[in-house]
Amino acid sequence: MTLTDRITSPPTRGSIATELSALLPRVRRRPGPPSLVAAALPVASTDPIDLFAAARSLGLEAALWFQPAADRFIVGIGRAWAVQPGGSDRFAAASSAWRTLMAEAVVADAARHLPEAGPRLIGGLGFTGRTPAGDDPWSPFGPASLVLPSFGVAQGGRGASLTVAVGPDQIDGVDPENLECQWDEIARAAGDVRDARLRTPAPDDGWGPGATDGRGATDGSGALRIIGRRPDRMAWDRTVGLFAGAVGRGRIDKVVLARRVILRADADLDIVAALRHLSRTAPESTTFAFVRDGTTFIGATPERLVRTTGRRFETVAIAGSAARGADPVTDARFAAALLASEKDREEHAVVVDMLRASLTPIVEELHIAEAPAILPLRHVQHLVTPVTGTTRDDGGLLALAQRLHPTPAVGGAPREIALALIAEHEGFDRGWYAGPIGWLGAEGDGELMVALRCALVEGMQATLFAGCGIVAASDPAREWEESRLKLRTMTAALGRLVEDER
């Protein structure tokens, strides 16, 4: 068995080169500009974090999309092609560019029929679509960036596959044998990561939601100190009061105020350990990571913006939050109080009403649960209402996402007034935080989540984000505590917070 056999199955050395060598001459003989070429091979199940870690160790651009509870993942390595649109029309621009690319693409039959195979984009579309300033931590990510990986490994309910893509600008100089060697190197590194992991047992996180409070994480990079907050506590209290007053006067129904906390460790933060912690302690969420020029955007988000399959779609309303209890009895009491909370029900209803209003003009069927349920996460629980349906037209994932983003769960309602208040008073650029992140397949379907419970990590420093929905009954102290609970997801994964924000 070769080292490649650790990941690919039934792999024979040269299979990538063989597949691409059969396709490339077709493209090179065609008149006009070169087009995308993609081939696919079956692969055996592997640990996606091992593969992501291997790519990082080799200095390659990498992306991870992992849903542990469903045993689904995508790992993207390298860059064959990308679209990086900005502005309010970034969804339409990305969709148009992708459709144009795929219309001329040469794709092997296996890539159309193997489980989970085929070209797909992975990345994010930013909260506002504004281009970040050159000195902004978000600068490497741009306003939006959807990347077609050179090597894409995907696993779902029907199996797993490796898709190898060569972009139009790479056709003339590509050597299939070199791509084969690159994949062998990645496979070898992933095997080494796996062997090292198996020699080190995973930590025991203990029972239930109260097992860690974010001040004694089970893995990560040691002590974390807060070196910056925006807004600070005084500005937070003042802004919450301002927004609550605007809601109370009928100017707006809801507005989401976010805050940014900057942490520093004594050594480089351990991205891979953090990913393992997130996937282990938040299996119901989507664990994600995107690497750009040495900076990693990492998190575990519970909130889906939209998923599409043809004309079928799934989305969800998540708004209204409470802490988890340290034992089942306390936990159940907190959940009951959340379900009965007039303030949280009001905040949640704004999101449900917006989804209904946005979707009704374009749907054939729309199904919204009559009452919210509880979504229990590691450190916090939310009110949740699933929404499913069928659209009249097959507009694809990005068209539906443009209609829905940003929902009142991360922006507010009415949308334009809420966004204006955020821009005026929040005091920092959200970048990709609270924006759509996910993947887009060759036929225009895919899944986008909302980038929550996340951090931007570079070396010893991490920038964390959390937001709270402000309505008329909002209390600044309670909202501060809610945001602190939401930050726990990332502080617990990255290390041990040595000071408290209370």
Image (cartoon, grey):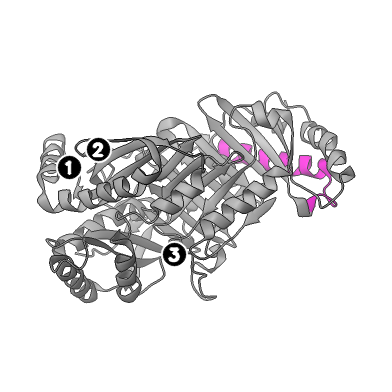
Q: Looking at this view, is 264 or 86 the one in front?
A: 86
Query: x, y percentage for residue 34?
Result: 81, 50
User: Mark 1 or mark 3, which has the lower sequence index?
Assistant: 3
User: Mark 1 or mark 2, which has the lower sequence index?
Assistant: 2
Badge 2 local density, few (<14 within 10 Å), some, or many (20+)? some
Residue annotated with mark 2:
208
Query: x, y percentage for residue 340?
Result: 10, 44
Q: Which quadrant: the C terminus? A: bottom left
Q: Are marks 1 and 2 in contact (CB under 8 Å)?
A: yes
Q: Are marks 1 and 3 in contact (CB under 8 Å)?
A: no
Give the label, 3 or 2, closer to the camera.
3
Q: Quadrant of residue 235?
A: bottom left
Q: Does 239 sit above or below residue 294?
A: below
Main SS of residues in magenta: helix
Name the amino acid type tagged 2: Gly
Q: Estimate the spatial distance between the alpha carbons at disc 3 and disc 2, rounded to whole Å.
A: 36 Å
Residue annotated with mark 1:
326
Which dot marks residue 128? Answer: 3
Name the amino acid type tagged 3: Thr
**Residues in magenta, as a range:** 170-196
- At horizontal 82% and vertical 36% (from top left) the residue drawn is 23
- In reply to whether residue 469 is colored magenta, the answer given is no
Which secondary structure, mark 3? loop
